[in-house]
Image (spheres, grey):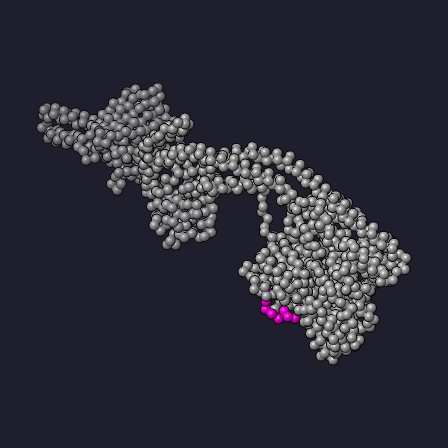
């Protein structure tokens, strides 16, 4: 039951809105205000970036270039002095007339006079130092250097070959033990070498610019750092050849302002060649210092932006907190409405939109309240409805109803399910079917079918089988379909009808069908046998029937002979008596005659008595003759079934006369109502038998056990060639259930009391087949029976000898 | 809430105006070596070797995404300046110190690094004084005992030298004394004799003529000069002038390009032991040799090779270092590292074994003779 509320909830729960990061209104408003404040500042910053900064860079370029040019000029002039002086000295030494001491003195004087030189020495034709001029403090160790082999030095070899002064690279001088550069000037086959200190070079460079932020470096031919304006790395033979700016300058791209990494900091610099020496001057400045003006501008700008933003933030915070306070208030009010408190005080605002919002919220509260009431009623109704429905499902007989969740777990199990599956609801709820009745494979199939039903609509009805806990097999007719469940998860319904019995019946029917043919054959054989027996029996019966008919006829003949005998007995007895009386009278007369006492009176009495006896005799003999003629007629009619034309009334009189002996025994009244002028061309024999049988039936059945009775025989013409003959009695009538069977052969209510059951059948056969008419019988129990014969005036011609027998 | 928001706004804006700074902080290393003065050939060559490794690793994106930065310090082969340099590097919170390049300085600074638990991956420091100690001092070439003994054996057995005089430069005493003592022990053991041990401190007023005269007293079979390349060149000059016929021999210290540059023809035929075969055709080494020439426009010397190896070892250790592990622990866990010529395999004390190559100067080039 608990799931019913979900239907309304899930309907309302549309897909949840994509979660987005939420910000307070005040923050959003503040951010937007700030953005607005920042826009002009940013615009200004872009202007600065694209206009002011490039011009600053240009200034920087020009500045560096000026410094580099000055340094180049200074260094070139510095070394050109040495170049010039050493050439002059070479000329002095060229004649090779001085002694070693003189030469040494000259060189000493030169070095001493000019601190520019660290040492000047002359190598002889083998390349060994023959004389060396040293500063004062080093002269004591002059011997250390005399004899040193300088012939392997690159610049010395080159000077010798080219016969021209050649500058060395910087190198570690074994004389000064400092990094030095030297110029070799050929003097005949000797070489004059002057080592020039590079130590003044930084000072030289420093003179050019007072800007300490600018670093000037000089690189020798090997790109080794020879001089550094800040004296850093001095003499460390640091090779800067790897710097892209140096490599570029070596390939002729001079003075290109470049940013690059140097000793861990980013610098801006350019490289300039010193042509005479094949050196490079590198003017660099750390990026921060080079762009200090730009950085200062940026800093100020940032200050302005920050100030603007702070101001904007303050203003924005004030404004937005006021707005957001109002929103929070309404939010609280809405929350209160949501919590079901509708009677909160609403304060007014000076903002129209807020007032509108407030009014709308109030209206909403009222609307919600009324809707809530309606919903409460509706929910109660819904609950009742659901209870009704569930109770109906629960109590439904024969239909097992179950609910399943999406995993095939049982959620509901009605009473019918308990009966059908033989499992109690408490056991079933919460389980899956494989825990109860199914194999895992069946259960998987079942689940798949559940899933399918939610896609394709109801599945079934289909048949399914299962095993009850007691091991017996059950069969079900199932329908499965999906109904909405909780929170969008499907729920499935299964409705099952137990068809185990039908199923079993079907099984046995199938078995039956399988053996049917065999059985049919068996039966056919039996039937054939029975049929044969029947045919035999029928023949026996027919034979018996004929026997019976014959015996009936004999019986009829017997009774007729008895009747005739009885009828003739009276006239013949009367005649006998009259003739015996006459005989006596004659004898007496004869005696008297003989005795002669004859008197007249005797003769006259005699004559009268003779006349009377003769009259009686005549009358009775006439009577007997009539009787015999009549009997003869009946017998002829009956035996020969002779067709003739006769008057119906006469024929009936003759029949009744023949029946006289039978009728006399009974105290009944026989009434004839027959038209005189009815002539028939028919068979009087069969007609007589019909009337005889009917009257006999009335006497034997209708008046059985009664003192009196009336039989009315009536006949009239009903058309030109049709007459109707009715024989009615007022007997006890025929039971309705017997009425239909009256004409059936062998039907009798007096079986064993002498009835053959054929009388009425003979009547029917004679009436329809011999006389060609129709016969019907009407009877009311207790009121009488009436047999009606509709006969043609002319009986049909076609007749056979056999049918006549009936 | 509002406050946080304001701060976030301010930061976002300032970030937008000043440009982002998202790069990972670089790993800092220190280098100590004599970059100026008489023995600057060791320090500058070593620095160049380090620079090669540094450029390579940074071009490859650094270690674990962090660039490597090296702070270079010049100790001028002065123990006091060396100590100052190391203190400065400790203060700069470097991850490890590479150098120094002379034993003298090394002996002076090892207590400092031990105290600070700072790894010191030395250059061509071969003094036996630092051998066999469980400390922060590591080196990638063998202790000089091996080299001195090799030289002693060579002289006695291959050249028939029996009487030797030696010049010992005390300005790098830790190395030179260790070397000459090992040499003498081995040489005497063989049956030779170190007759004169001329010690001096190299400086501007050193009188090489006088020292050479003392060195040549009693015309020894061989003269062993345990000093720098510049000094050997100056000795060589005097020896020639004084008409010496003795076999001239140096220690590994002199085996740099400076010897042939300054000595010229005077050092022809000199026997110079080397830590490495300068003519080796090993592909890794020859590749390095060519690159070095390209970069610095001079021939590679042993200090560059040693320092390059030392630097690579440190890089590898940094790359493999696990959390909670000191670099020393990493080195002792890994033990084996690739070198330009030979693999470097540390023992428990951070020492390694390495070969000694004996070379002879011919036409200004070192040729391996043993």
Vertical comparison of B47 with A616: above or below: below
Answer yes or no: is residue B316 visible: no
State whether the magenta stretch is mostly helix, strand or loop.
Answer: loop
Residue A128, image x and y in percent? 84, 63
Q: Residue at x 90, y 60 (%)?
A: A97
Query: Which span of residues is magenta-colored?
Result: B126-138
Position of the N terminus of chain B by quadrant = top left
Q: Residue at x 72, y 78 (%)?
A: B188
Front residue of A746/B21: it is B21
User: What x and y, as percent, mark residue B69?
Assistant: 63, 54
Query: What is the quadrant of residue A678 in the picture?
Result: top left
Taking depth in this image into account, of B112 and A114 the one nearest to the observer is A114
Q: Position of residue A270 (x, y in %)?
A: 71, 45
Q: Is residue A165 found left or right of A358 in the rendered image?
A: right
The C terminus of chain B lies in quadrant: bottom right
Percent coordinates x, y for residue A588 in the rendering: 12, 31
Q: Which residue is painted at 75% across and 64% down in the image?
A: B230
Residue farthest toward the bottom in the current orientation of the protein? B191
Name the one closer to the observer, A252 or A801.
Answer: A252
Residue A432 highlighted magenta (yes or no): no
Front residue (pair A31, A173): A173
Q: Is residue A651 left or right of residue B298?
A: left
- Residue B341 can be seen in this image: yes
Query: What residue is shown at x 54% (from left), y 35% (from top)?
Result: A38
């Amino acid at each position: 039951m608990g799931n019913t509320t979900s239907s309304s909830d899930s309907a309302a729960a549309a897909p949840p809105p994509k979660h987005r990061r939420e910000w307070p209104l005040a923050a959003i408003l503040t951010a937007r205000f700030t953005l607005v404040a920042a826009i002009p500042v940013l615009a200004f910053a872009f202007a600065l970036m694209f206009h002011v900064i490039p011009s600053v860079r240009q200034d920087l370029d020009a500045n560096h270039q000026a410094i580099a040019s000055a340094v180049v000029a200074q260094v070139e002039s510095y070394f050109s002095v040495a170049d010039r002086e050493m050439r002059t000295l070479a000329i002095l030494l060229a004649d090779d007339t001085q002694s070693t001491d003189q030469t040494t003195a000259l060189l000493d004087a030169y070095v001493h006079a000019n601190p520019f030189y660290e040492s000047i020495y002359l190598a002889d034709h083998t390349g060994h130092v023959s004389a060396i001029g040293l500063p004062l403090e080093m002269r004591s160790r002059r011997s250390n250097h005399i004899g040193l082999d300088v012939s392997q030095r690159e610049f010395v070899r080159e000077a010798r070959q080219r016969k021209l002064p050649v500058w060395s690279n910087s190198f570690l001088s074994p004389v000064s033990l400092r990094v030095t550069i030297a110029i070799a000037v050929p003097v005949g086959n000797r070489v004059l070498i002057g080592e020039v200190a590079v130590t003044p070079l930084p000072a030289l460079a420093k003179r050019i610019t007072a800007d300490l932020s600018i670093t000037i470096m000089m690189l020798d031919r090997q790109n080794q750092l020879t001089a550094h304006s800040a004296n850093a790395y001095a003499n460390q033979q640091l090779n800067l050849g790897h710097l892209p700016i140096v490599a570029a300058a070596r390939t002729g791209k001079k003075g290109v302002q470049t940013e690059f990494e140097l000793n861990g900091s980013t610098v801006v610099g350019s490289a300039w060649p010193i042509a005479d020496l094949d050196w490079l001057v590198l003017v660099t400045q750390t990026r921060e210092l080079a762009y200090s003006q730009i950085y200062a501008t940026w800093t100020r700008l940032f200050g302005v932006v920050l100030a603007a933003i702070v101001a904007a933030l303050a203003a924005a915070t004030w404004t937005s907190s006021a707005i957001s306070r109002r929103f929070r208030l309404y939010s609280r009010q809405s929350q209160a409405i949501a919590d079901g408190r509708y009677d909160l005080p609403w304060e007014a605002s000076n903002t129209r939109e807020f007032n509108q919002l407030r009014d709308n919220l109030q209206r909403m509260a009222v609307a919600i309240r009324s809707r809530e009431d309606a919903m409460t009623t509706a929910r109660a109704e819904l609950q009742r409805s659901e209870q009704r429905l569930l109770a109906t499902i629960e109590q439904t007989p024969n239909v097992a109803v179950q609910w399943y969740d999406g995993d095939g777990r049982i959620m509901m199990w009605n009473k019918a399910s308990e009966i059908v599956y033989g499992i109690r609801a408490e056991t079933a709820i919460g389980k899956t079917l494989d825990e109860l009745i199914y194999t895992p494979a069946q259960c998987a199939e079942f689940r798949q079918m559940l899933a399918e039903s939610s896609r394709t609509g109801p599945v079934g009805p289909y048949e399914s089988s299962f095993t009850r806990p007691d091991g017996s097999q059950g069969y079900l007719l199932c329908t499965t379909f999906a109904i909405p469940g909780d929170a969008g998860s499907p729920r499935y319904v299964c409705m099952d009808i137990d068809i185990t019995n039908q199923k079993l019946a079907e099984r046995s029917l199938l078995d039956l069908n399988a053996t049917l043919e065999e059985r049919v054959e068996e039966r056919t054989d039996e039937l054939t046998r029975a049929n044969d027996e029947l045919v035999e029996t029928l023949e026996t019966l027919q034979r018996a029937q004929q026997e019976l008919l014959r015996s009936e006829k004999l019986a009829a003949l017997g009774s007729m002979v008895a009747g005739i005998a009885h009828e003739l007995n009276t006239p013949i007895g009367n005649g006998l008596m009259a003739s015996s009386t006459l005989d006596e009278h004659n004898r007496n007369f004869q005696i008297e005659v003989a005795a002669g006492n004859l008197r007249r009176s005797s003769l006259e009495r005699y004559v009268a008595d003779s006349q009377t006896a003769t009259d009686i005799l005549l009358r009775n003999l006439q009577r007997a003759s009539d009787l015999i003629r009549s009997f003869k007629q009946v017998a002829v009619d009956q035996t020969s079934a002779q067709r003739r034309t006769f008057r119906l009334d006469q024929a009936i009189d003759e029949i009744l006369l023949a029946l006289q002996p039978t009728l006399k025994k009974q105290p009944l009244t026989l009434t004839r109502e027959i038209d005189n002028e009815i002539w028939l061309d028919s068979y009087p024999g069969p007609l007589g038998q019909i009337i005889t049988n009917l009257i006999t039936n009335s006497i034997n059945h209708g008046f059985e056990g009664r003192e009196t009775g009336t039989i009315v025989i009536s006949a009239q013409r009903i058309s030109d060639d049709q007459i109707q003959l009715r024989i009615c009695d007022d007997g006890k009538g025929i039971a309705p259930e017997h009425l239909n069977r009256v004409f059936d052969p062998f039907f009798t209510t007096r079986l064993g009391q002498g009835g053959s059951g054929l009388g009425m059948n003979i009547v029917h056969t004679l009436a329809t087949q011999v006389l060609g008419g129709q016969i019907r019988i009407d009877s009311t129990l207790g009121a009488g029976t009436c047999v009606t014969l509709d006969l043609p005036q002319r009986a049909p011609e076609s007749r056979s000898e056999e049918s006549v027998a009936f | 809430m509002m406050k946080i928001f304001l701060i976030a706004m301010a930061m976002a804006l300032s970030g937008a105006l000043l440009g982002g700074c998202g790069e990972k902080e670089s790993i800092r290393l220190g280098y100590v070596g004599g970059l100026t003065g008489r023995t600057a050939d060791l320090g500058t060559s070593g620095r160049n070797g380090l620079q090669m490794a540094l450029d390579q690793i940074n071009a490859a994106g650094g270690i674990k995404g962090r660039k490597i930065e090296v702070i270079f310090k010049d100790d001028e082969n002065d123990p006091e300046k060396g100590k100052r340099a190391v203190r400065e590097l400790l203060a700069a919170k470097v991850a490890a110190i590479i150098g120094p390049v002379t034993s003298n300085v090394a002996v002076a600074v090892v207590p400092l690094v031990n105290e600070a638990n700072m790894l010191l991956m030395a250059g061509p420091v071969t003094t036996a004084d630092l051998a066999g100690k469980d400390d922060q001092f590591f080196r990638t070439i063998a202790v000089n005992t091996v080299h001195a003994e090799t030289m002693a054996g060579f002289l006695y057995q291959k050249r028939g030298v029996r009487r030797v005089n030696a010049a010992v430069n005390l300005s790098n005493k830790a190395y030179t004394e260790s070397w000459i003592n090992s040499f003498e022990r081995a040489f005497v053991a063989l049956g030779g004799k170190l007759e004169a041990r001329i010690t001096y401190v190299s400086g501007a007023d050193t009188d090489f003529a006088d020292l050479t005269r003392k060195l040549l007293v009693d015309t020894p079979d061989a003269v062993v000069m345990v000093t720098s390349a510049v000094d050997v060149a100056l000795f060589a000059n005097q020896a020639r002038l004084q008409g010496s016929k003795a076999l001239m021999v140096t220690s590994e210290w002199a085996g740099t390009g400076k010897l042939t540059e300054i000595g010229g023809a005077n050092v022809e035929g000199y026997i110079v032991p080397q830590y490495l075969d300068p003519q080796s055709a090993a592909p890794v080494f020859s590749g390095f040799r060519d690159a070095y020439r390209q970069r610095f426009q001079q021939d590679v010397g042993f200090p560059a090779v040693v320092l390059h190896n030392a630097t690579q070892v440190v890089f590898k250790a940094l790359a493999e270092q696990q959390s909670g592990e000191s670099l020393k622990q990493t080195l002792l866990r890994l033990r084996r590292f690739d070198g330009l010529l030979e693999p470097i395999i540390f023992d428990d004390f951070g020492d390694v074994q390495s070969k000694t190559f004996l070379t002879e100067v011919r036409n200004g080039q070192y040729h391996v003779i043993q």
